[in-house]
Amino acid sequence: EAEVAQSPRYKITEKSQAVAFWCDPISGHATLYWYRQILGQGPELLVQFQDESVVDDSQLPKDRFSAERLKGVDSTLKIQPAELGDSAMYLCASSYSAGNTDTQYFGPGTRLTVL
Amino acid sequence: QQQVKQSPQSLIVQKGGISIINCAYENTAFDYFPWYQQFPGKGPALLIAIRPDVSEKKEGRFTISFNKSAKQFSLHIMDSQPGDSATYFCAASTGFQKLVFGTGTRLLVSP
């Protein structure tokens, strides 16, 4: 069964450092999502791509976060500089299309700890 | 208005019992209500979903009950098993808009 791949699985960094997360969606999925999940809360959408275009980044802290999906396949989420409050699980998900009934398949996530 | 309120925060059920998790929403434009199951160290996985044109949907031991007038929906897990121990999230969305997740319910099914 195809899965969404993410790396690294765990990342520990110091405040003010730069970090990057990578996501490889299920083959053929045009829509890719990055979520942030704070411990004890539900996932919150940071950015949504349709192919290589951003369709929703309203909750992305653009002063320090950036995301790209250059060829419309895999994607990278970057934080520079990292802050203590960025400690969370970063989840990538993909779906065949952007329709809300298209199932979103989540990867295992990257757990970020900022010291 | 975009919030989805979920309760309880945690739940302990004996093996064989019924687990019930409730969610409430305000945005009447929501037209898709999925439930996700998340095991430790894993991403959420879609468990079951419902559209507001039906009041109930059942898949195996999992049932969604939907009350459009009360703007509430709930997940019922019949014959709960230890393997069902996980965190459950309700969510809602409309059209091509983003999924809004509840805060999660940590379910523990005791043997």
Image: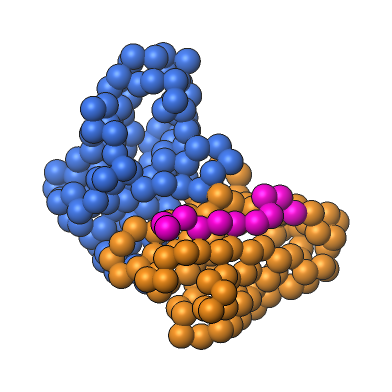
To which quarter of the image does residue B109 belong?
Answer: bottom right
Q: At 47% across and 33% down in the image, what residue appears?
A: A88
Q: At 40% across and 32% down in the image, what residue appears?
A: A8
B104 relative position to A34: left or right: right
Residue closer to the observer: B30 or B27:
B27
Q: At 74% across and 54% down in the image, what residue appears?
A: B11
To which quarter of the image does residue A59 belong?
Answer: top left
Q: Which chain is assigned blue? A: A
Q: Is residue B86 visible?
A: no
Relative to A9, say whether A107 is above or below: below
Residue A82: horizontal and vertical position, in percent? 35, 21
Outermost residue, bottom side: B54
Residue closer to the observer: B94 or B57:
B94
Per the rendered image, the range of residues in magenta is B1-11
Chain B: colour as depicted: orange
Q: Is residue A58 visible?
A: yes
Residue closer to the observer: A7 or B79:
B79
Please check the rendered image and state whether residue B37 is part of the magenta-colored stretch, yes or no: no
Relative to B86, say whether A115 is above or below: above
Residue B90: horizontal and vertical position, in percent? 54, 61
Residue closer to the observer: A38 or A8:
A38
Residue B57: horizontal and vertical position, in percent? 57, 81
Please check the rendered image and state whether residue B3 is part of the magenta-colored stretch, yes or no: yes
Relative to A10, say whether B75 is above or below: below
Relative to B58, say whether A104 is above or below: above
